[in-house]
Amino acid sequence: MKNLLGVILILGILLSFSLVTLAAEEITVWAMGAEAQKIGEMVASFEEKYPDIGVTVQAIPWSNAHDKLITAIAGGTGPDVAQLGTTWMAEFAPIGVFAELSRYLEHSTLISREQFFSGSYATNVVDGHLFGIPWYVDTRVLFYRTDLVAEIGYHHPPKNWEQLREIAGQLAQKGEYGLALSTNNYQEFLPFVWQNGGRIFDQNGKIAVTEPAFVEALEFYVQLFKDGVAPLDAQGTDLFQEFAAGRMPMYFSGPWMINLTREQVPEIDGKWSVALMPEKKTRTSFIGGCNLVIFNSSKQKEAAWKFVEFMGEAKNQLTWYKISGSLPTNRHTWEEPYFDDLAMVKVFGRQLEDAKAPLNIPQWAQIEYLLQQRLQEACYGKKSPLEAMEALAQDIEGIM
Amino acid sequence: MKRSLLIPLGFLAPALTLILVFMVLPLVVSFYLSLTNFNVAALLDYSLADFIGLANYQRLLRDELFWQAFWNTGYFVLIGVPSALVLSLLLAILLNQARLFGKNFFKVGYYLPSITTTVAIAVVWRWVLNPRYGILNWLLGIVGIAGPNWFGDPEWAMPAIILLVVWKGLGYNMVIFLAGLQNIPGHLYEAAQLDGAGRVKQLIYITIPLLRPTSFFVSVMTMIGYLQLFAEPYMLTDGGPLNATLSIVLYMYRHGFKFFNLGYASALAYVLFAIIFIVTLLQMKFRDKEIQY
């Protein structure tokens, strides 16, 4: 009798253990770089909301993230959920490694398509299919020295191309340069093209880099170097020091520069600010950031979706902003009173309404290189803007 | 007979297996890859890679960037290898003097860069060569020379890379030359002195000829190493500005691991292999006879 009781007791204990393990689903999430360290708090509150789903976070350093993904795809050993840079979507999505998510999003009561910035949402769409949910975004705006711009008689940042040229020119005469521009970073150059109504491919998929709108934007860009307003070697300099010394009193960059500038050169606090992109036809900027994708090989897609959905929810996006400083991709988050005190960050929120990502096509990685190469040739004066873009058109033709 | 062959093979088996699996097999596979259009899509489904014969090699010949990388690498090797040889030989001769203050200190000093990782060196040199705050241009400024914008100027970027690579490799070559110098019997110099040969003549008629085996080794190894220039431009310039520092290996890396055109990258690797093979062969062929006194 005693023995029987013991057996039942042991069986009961074993059973309850196995029930626990049966109920709890385990999902693996790949987080990259700094996000991996900071995501813990979000995971904890997720597990609180969904006690039956356990989350294991694996930290992947950015430097080998791309290799890791390739290896995982080749070996079929992917996680359930992964963080993916927006410009990587097009490379991996067409080969069928990510789950299509439009079905999940349609049925979601917590998030909807309209909540996300359209530029950010678009980075998740490849060939008309939705392969990810935006997680956080970044975009570029104009950083400028308010005091120096005021000294030459302007009490506002450059609002359009004309004013940009004018103010930068005058600043260059007073100091050393008017603004820092990159000769080989497409993220700084493409916004000018978009602002002028240019594009890489037209609506019929024809290469459009030799269209007047595109070439004009390049001419404007190159002229800033030719006039000595922008230095050719901005990348070899310590931008913070140059900004503080007034030698490069304007530049275009992302949200991370707000805190970095405060830390690196606190002596110019209050003497600088950020502003929307200067206008031509539009004020479009570049949008980047990260999305969350679900791997097709995942056996717990429902649980994985709950995690992705959770991270996209407006209130969790606010928590995530507070933890990491990554800009929310959910527009409702920006309406929170929390942002009212953050004037500079709010500029980014406004810029995000008019921000675009480059094309979501697998060849993008190569086009990016080709574009940067020809852009540099034009900036250094090796080729005229039109010649450079004709050469680019041929380059792109070659890989399509 | 059979047994006598089996026993040594048995002992060699572990090493042979490793060589076969990790050296020979990848060589064969990458050669096959170079005949296909293997790209990122083929990673998931190998059947998507088609056999395209020599098309990759034909494309290479028409590839403007490949030729740019080819000439850049040639420029780097032609200036870099002789500079490295002459400088390290001079250093070795200096440090071989019997009475020299702080000899070991200098030996360690010159050897240190060879065992420091390129990444750390690149970070430091980026600042040394910085046109605005760099110490080199500051020193040049003191003697009245306006230093160039090293990594920002297409004309000066490659010289800057050469400077860095030669400096980094100096110590290693120097140690090998030192060993070679110490093998030259002292009585030869004594005899030459008695015959009235000065320092320069001793260098030309004794040191250089007797160092031939060492110089041959150093020049072949340096040449092979320099033809595979990668880490320095990768860290410092990413091949720029205007592709002035794009080397063959950097271009191969870009195709292989940035665009995942593994077929094309393999073709590049085989072309580089052919270049190294031919250059080394030429060096062997034109090697001077060894001299014995």
Image (cartoon, rainbow, N blue to C red):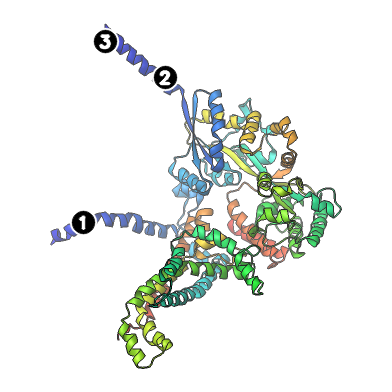
The chain identifier of the residue carrying mark 1 reads: B
Res A321 visible: yes
Residue sitting nearer the eye, A363 or A373: A373
Whole-number angstrom distance, CA of label 2 to CA of label 1? 54 Å
The picture places residue A69, in percent across and down from the top left corner, at: 49, 44
Res B11 label: 1
Helix, strand or loop at label 1? It is helix
Residue type of the residue flagged with mark 2: Leu
Residue under label 3, please give it: A3
At 47% from the left and 68% from the top, the residue drawn is: B226
Residue A131 image point, x, y percent: 58, 38
Left or right side of B242 for A231: right
Q: Are marks 3 and 2 in contact (CB under 8 Å)?
A: no
Q: Counting other residues with Cα less than 10 Å from the Cα at mark 1, is it few (<14), some (14-19), or many (20 or more)?
A: few
Dividing the picture into quadrants, the one containing residue B62 is bottom right
Task: Calculate the distance from the C-alpha at mark 3 to the C-alpha at mark 1.
Answer: 60 Å
In this rendering, the answer to whether A47 lies above or below B246 is above
